[in-house]
């Protein structure tokens, strides 16, 4: 519709630009909005009327379509300074939902609605969640971080003391290692397929700074981190990583952590599987060996084809996902469209993403949007043409180590059929002749 109007520059409706120019307010005040609407309606042509009828807006909303002046332009808006802003009430699809198959919300996952979002930052209310025992309500004044073990001194910090250390902000992705599981049912939407990944700007104190403050003994090789939730989730992190880029994070996208993300303090372990970023962090035990906790023995190990389990598979390997068009989307016209998606690697920067529309027979390079940051989501885009034929859309990412995202067949070949975590396989989306998009793996 907007396309139609732009082409018709000789049409009287080209004057419509006056409707949106800043000067219109004055006009409205002088002539009155009603008079304006009538004047413009008189310019309507049969072509425009037909285009309006075919527009997707509901019939009842037709009064708000050009050439009329919509009702919201003819009235005063809502109040200013709502204490905390929320998205438009029309954005009903941009919400988290329980991971498919899960019914109870305590030891559960919820997914980021990737197919509704753009760019590399996930809004805080939509960051994916994974809780082993629900979300605790923690009074920051009563929260403490204890550091002990192979340190020169054992120390307990208040939140204020932690925030007084020099801080940094970094944009990173976080992904659950169970994203997605190898097992059916395969999801319908991008969120159901791989919505346990999000991106945010995290602010906090480099763990290294605080470790230098307490002093590490030479024998310190691991740090066992423990959460204050009912699960007391506990994981061991190698000391080299702790001294590299691990954060004691207290803010996310500029505001304090959300309770779901670990308020008031979480560990953030860039590029490693999400379960190591212990939320509601209360204790760091510096040791000379890993804790071999429940979360690194019974859980979060990868059963291999020979029956042995791979332990401490920390890094989230390079991966990409087409978010648009993706499952449940629909192409409504033939012509040029755009593949959009996100790519990420726990080993560093994304160096390229290839896309295919013919199920992997031919590939071409997508454009990466700036910024391309290490261990962060990276946006990619690629145009493609749709002439009503069936397509199989795919993307495959590469990172700065030269690693290329595998197919599911390659992954199963390397790891056998019994692995549950660390599935970074290429995800296909099928476009039907009707334009409807569904999971190509279903
Ligand atoms: N204390 C605690 N930390 C935790 C968890 C938990 O249940 N309790 N879940 C872990 C898992 S499995 C993941 S994937 C990430 C999820 O972080 P998010 O909910 O902020 O996305 O937190 C990790 N840290
Ligand atoms: Mo996880």
Image (cartoon, grey):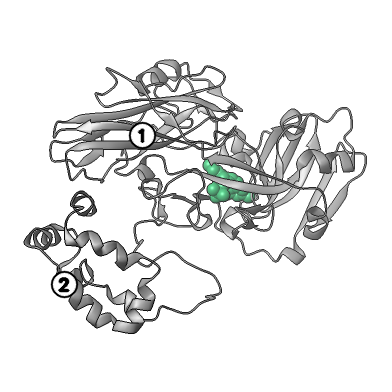
Q: Pick the residue in front: 135 or 118.
A: 118
Judged by depth in the image, the label closer to the viewer, 1 or 2, is 2
The answer to whether marks 1 and 2 mark residues whose Cβ atoms lie closer than 8 Å is: no
Residue that appears at 51% across and 51% down: 129
Q: Pick the residue in front: 24 or 207.
A: 24
For label 2, the SS is helix
Q: CA distance from mark 1 to mark 2?
A: 57 Å
Q: Which residue matches tag 1?
A: 183
Q: Which residue matches tag 2?
A: 41
Task: Classify residue 407 by image quadrant.
Answer: top left
**Which residue lies most toward the right here?**
152
Of callouts 1 and 2, the N-terminal one = 2
- CB of mark 1 near ligand 2 (< 8 Å): no
Residue 392, given in percent of the width and then of the height, sits at 24, 29
Residue 255 seen in render: yes
Q: Quadrant of the N terminus?
A: bottom left
Q: Pick the residue in front: 247 or 266.
A: 247
């Amino acid at each position: 519709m907007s396309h139609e109007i732009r082409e018709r520059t000789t049409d009287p409706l080209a004057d419509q630009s006056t409707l949106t120019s800043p000067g219109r307010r004055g006009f409205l005040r002088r002539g009155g909005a009603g008079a304006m609407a009538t004047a413009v309606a008189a310019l309507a042509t049969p072509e425009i009327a037909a285009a309006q009828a075919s527009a997707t807006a509901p019939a009842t909303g037709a009064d708000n379509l050009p050439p009329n002046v919509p009702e919201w332009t003819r009235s005063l808006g809502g109040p200013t300074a709502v204490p905390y802003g929320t998205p438009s009430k029309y954005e009903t699809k941009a919400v988290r939902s329980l991971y498919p198959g899960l019914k109870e919300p305590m030891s559960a996952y919820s997914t980021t609605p990737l197919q509704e979002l753009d760019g590399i930052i996930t809004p805080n209310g939509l960051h994916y969640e994974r809780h082993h025992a629900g979300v605790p309500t923690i009074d920051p004044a009563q929260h403490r971080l204890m550091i002990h073990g192979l340190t020169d001194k054992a120390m307990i910090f208040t939140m204020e003391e932690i925030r007084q250390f020099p801080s940094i902000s970094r944009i990173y992705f976080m992904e659950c290692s169970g994203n997605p599981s190898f097992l059916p049912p395969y999801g319908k939407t991008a969120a159901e397929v791989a919505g346990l990944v999000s991106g945010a700007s995290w602010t906090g104190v480099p763990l290294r700074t605080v470790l230098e403050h307490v002093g590490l003994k030479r024998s310190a090789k691991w740090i066992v981190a423990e959460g204050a939730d009912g699960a007391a989730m506990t994981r061991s992190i190698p000391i080299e990583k702790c001294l590299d880029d691990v954060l004691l994070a207290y803010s996310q996208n500029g505001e304090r952590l959300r309770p779901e993300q670990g308020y008031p303090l979480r560990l953030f372990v860039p590029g490693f599987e999400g379960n190591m970023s212990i939320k509601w962090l209360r204790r760091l035990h510096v040791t000379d060996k890993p804790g071999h906790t429940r979360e690194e023995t019974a859980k979060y190990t990868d059963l291999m084809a020979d029956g042995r389990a791979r332990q401490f598979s920390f890094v989230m390997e390079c991966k990409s996902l087409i978010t648009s068009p993706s499952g449940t989307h629909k192409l409504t016209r033939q012509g040029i469209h755009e593949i959009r998606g996100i790519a990420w690697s726990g080993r560093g920067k994304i160096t390229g993403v290839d896309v295919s529309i013919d199920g992997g027979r031919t590939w071409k390079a997508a454009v990466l949007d700036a910024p391309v940051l290490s261990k962060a989501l990276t946006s990619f885009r690629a145009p493609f043409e749709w002439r009503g034929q069936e397509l199989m859309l795919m993307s495959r990412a590469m990172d700065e180590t030269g690693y290329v995202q595998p197919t599911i067949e390659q992954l199963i070949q390397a790891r056998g059929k019994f692995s549950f975590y660390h599935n970074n396989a290429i995800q296909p989306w099928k476009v039907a002749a009707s334009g409807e998009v569904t999971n190509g793996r279903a």
